[in-house]
Amino acid sequence: MDEQPTPRPQRPIEILRARHGGISKELKEYFNERQRLKKAIRAALAEGPRSVPEIARACGIPPPKAMWHVMAMRRYGEVVEAGERDDYVLYALKSKGA
Amino acid sequence: MEYRVNLALPAELNRFEEAGLNIAKCFNCGTCTAMCSLTEGERSFPRRMIRYAQLGLEERLLESAEPWLCYYCGECSKTCPREAQPGELMMALRRWLTTKYDFTGLSRRLYLSHAWEAGLLAGVALLVLALFLLPGWLGVPFGFAAITPEAAEHVRLDLFAPRHVIHIADWVLAAFLLVFLGVNAIRMIYYVRRGHRDRQTRLSDWLGQAHQLIVHGVTQKHWRGCEKEERRRWLFHVLLVSGYATMFLLVVVFLGSFQRDDADFHWTALFGYYATATLMGVTLAFMRDRVKKRAEISKYSHVTDWMFLVLLFLTSLSGILLHLARLLDLPWPTYVLYVVHLMIAVPMLVVEVPFGKWLHLVFRPVSEYLTAVAHASESRGVQKATVRVVPATQRP
Amino acid sequence: MPYIHDRYDALVIGGGIAGMQAALDLGEQGFDVLLVEKGPSIGGVMVGLNKVFPTLDCSSCICTPRMAESAHHPRIRLQTYTEVQAVRRDGAGFAVELLKKPRYLDETACIGCGECELACPIEVPHEFDYGLGARRAIYIPHGNAIPQKAVLSVEDCVFCGKCEKVCPADCMDFTQLPERVTTMVGAVIVATGLEITPMDAKPHYGRGLIPNVMSPLAMERIQSSNGPYGRVLRPADGKVPRSIAYVQCAGSRDRSIGIPYCSRVCCMYALKQALLLRHYIHDVEVTLYYMDIRAFGKGYEQFYRRALAEGVKVVKGKVGRITELENYDLSLRVELLDEDQRLVERRHELVVLSQGLIPAWHPSAILGIEEADDHFIKAPDLKVAPSVTTVAGTFAAGVAAGPKDIPDAIVEAGDAAMAAANYLAAMGWNGTAARVPVPA
């Protein structure tokens, strides 16, 4: 950084990005997959409340993976519990009005 | 029956192992049993065996077939939380039990004393030598005395060691072995059944399961239930058994066609080659394992383990050299090698087989047989016999 | 305001329950304490626990007042997200070198509103929930965190800059760099706490790869009301588990994994979790597979009896292998020592490995103090001076000095504080004279 002065003043976030060599390939892949799965889970839940194994089947991913991603969405308020069926909790999208 | 506690039992068992076993280390968690892929239901080991040893319950151990159901994959020793080496304890138990089943007391001396072992082997070897030397002095044409000028020029084993004489000796030897192995097996069955007298068995199961003796004697197939890495060792062992059995049959049953008189090649030699190759190959591989000490089973070698491999190897080596000498029509080397071969093979068969490590060829299949019989009877719902427990205070 | 003065009476390393207690005890006696914590919040392991044995008090309810007190005490300077790099004997005291890791925001300006976290687009596994829950790249460590300040984990950052845009306090500072700070202290107390036995320590317990074979700390989070699932579910598929097994001594008393000692807390935390599971899930079957139950503390034996009375099952026998079945259930191979010594395969829907305690930090290189054979800090005079280490002026408290439960850690922290105070007096440490007044 010392030897190559940047041509124009950078925004602070760009400085941080440059210092860390940008986004790593793994993180980028992870992020993209996460976005894709979020979308897929939303699509699966659009049809009504689902259990984690059902969501997993709908998204074509193993249940442990589905569990983490659904719980992550629950953590940030996108998904809520909507009852129980046969020892499985059902999850639904949080309605916009609520 | 009452059980007497032998406080010296742990120390006694220590005399039968080379690993510096400390039975007191074990805190009886049962990891070894749960790790063992051969243990099953109530046929559980090694922990129960260690417990008996810790408590000095000598009779209980004597009545257990379990040590013979273990093929020493060493998984228990690797995972033992106390590094108490349960696998090595099972090995020590097998040696100790061998001495207990043997009614002569010779086995115990052989296991515990190098002098007895070496002395007895050398004694029998010298006896064999004497058999080829002495008849000459007595004027009997046998052995070195039978080497006529013709026999000195060409190989004439029919003069040096006539087949019919050797064959009779073979049968005597076989009968000797049968008696000792049989008695040992019967004693083992007696003890184990005594330990399980509360479990009734049916004669039909004893008969119906008899094939187990052959199956396990030939294949030791339960060994394959051990960890995957054990498959190679199991295969090698099957080869070894096949080689040993082939050779035994050739010598005891088919000596007439196996021992040739001249430099001819005969088809029986093919079986001899197979037996020699497997015996030498496998014993070499096992010796290499014992030197490298990588697997748990080959980490600790008792002198009898070495003796087993070395004697088998030397028997095969002298046998094949003898065969070569005969094919090359070298009379004197043939005669000398014939005697050397017998000086190794006969002590092995007379001393080691009925009193040493070889006995496992009987005990393993018998233990599997006993287990199968018990299992069969149980699965038919044969009732447990009631055992009257006599309170200790009522005993004289 | 300079955030670190050039001189303190004592440095306490580690902001868990033992470190906080030692700092508070010294602070109350009028000593100035620098309390350094490597994570973004104090509270240690305890603040993440659900409830404590044997009282079943809410753990964070007991822990958070201590945390607040430590953070606001006039004589305690709390320094989070900071690591101790070097401690050298210098005259009567120690020269201390610290590395302050960047939060990428002005800590004094952050109001802890969490707007940045809500704006952040990426979720990653949350350390506080042992990976079961999610956090974002910028996040408030957890609801009970002290300080309630955000921290940006730059490894997870996608550099979108949204946090900066939404921050109402305008406190983001992406240009921060790690900062080296030096100070002088009269005494050092090490309270760096614990980690649990790695989940892959025993290959036959699934090498940490079976989702329904859990660590006990993860179970604490699952049971907590603010846990990752909000209720007790199993991680593989979100099923309400109806049959749960605890494998005792899974990570202690085992020479084959190099941890021969008893970790002293596993029996009790397992009983506690088992008992609570009986409360949380209707008709759940909970079985502890154990070698022997060590309920040695005050009220512990009674707690054990209570757990049994409330339906927790105990089975004597150490589990050998755990196999995952096709529906994420587990099969446990175990010898039933009290039932005919039979070997059985038992099926359970969830398994908790009662892992042991190992030291979280090995300070010998930095502090020059010796470790004992068990790798915890050595106390050469264990019986009468349990907190005294092999280096004069350096003391140890809590699990850093050996496995122990919370009451013992607190008692030992008090002892370490007392020993440090005595030491400072004996050394004639003139902390007070040189002390710069601390703003209240």
Image (cartoon, coloured by chain):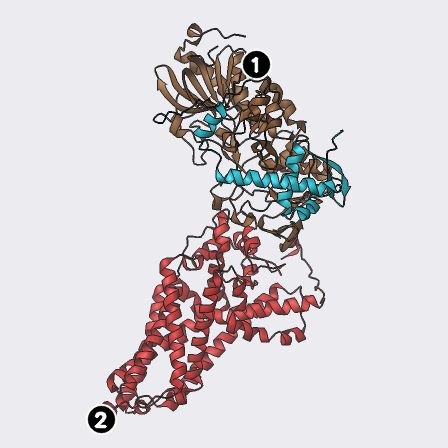
Q: Quadrant of residue B365?
A: bottom right
> Which amino acid does the dot numbered 2 rest on?
Pro
Q: Residue sitting at 57 percent across and 53 percent down?
A: B34
Look at the picture and state if B299 lies above or below C393. below
- State how far apart marks 2 and 1 are (Cα): 115 Å
Q: Nearer the viewer, residue C300 or A60?
A: A60
Relative image position of residue C164 (x, y in whole percent): 55, 22
User: For numbered disc 2, what is the local secondary structure?
Assistant: helix
Relative image position of residue B32 (x, y in whole percent): 54, 53
- Chain shown cyan: that is A
Q: Are marks 2 and 1 in contact (CB under 8 Å)?
A: no
Q: Nearer the viewer, residue B6 or B40?
A: B40
| Quadrant placement of the N terminus of chain B | bottom right
Residue highlighted by disc 1? C72
- Chain shown red: that is B
Residue highlighted by disc 2? B149
| Quadrant placement of the C terminus of chain B | bottom right
Classed neighbour count for the residue bearing mark 1: other residues with Cα under 10 Å, few (<14), some (14–19), many (≥20): few
Badge 2 sits on which subunit? B
> Which amino acid does the dot numbered 1 rest on?
His
User: For numbered disc 1, what is the local secondary structure?
Assistant: helix
How many marks on residues? Answer: 2
Q: Residue sitting at 47 percent across and 82 percent down?
A: B175
Is B382 placed left or right of A29 in the picture?
right
Relative image position of residue B326 (x, y in whole percent): 29, 85
Q: Nearer the viewer, residue B107 or C332?
A: C332
Q: Nearer the viewer, residue B348 or A77?
A: A77
Is B28 placed left or right of B208 in the picture?
left
Does residue C332 show up?
yes
Look at the picture and state if B152 lies above or below C335. below
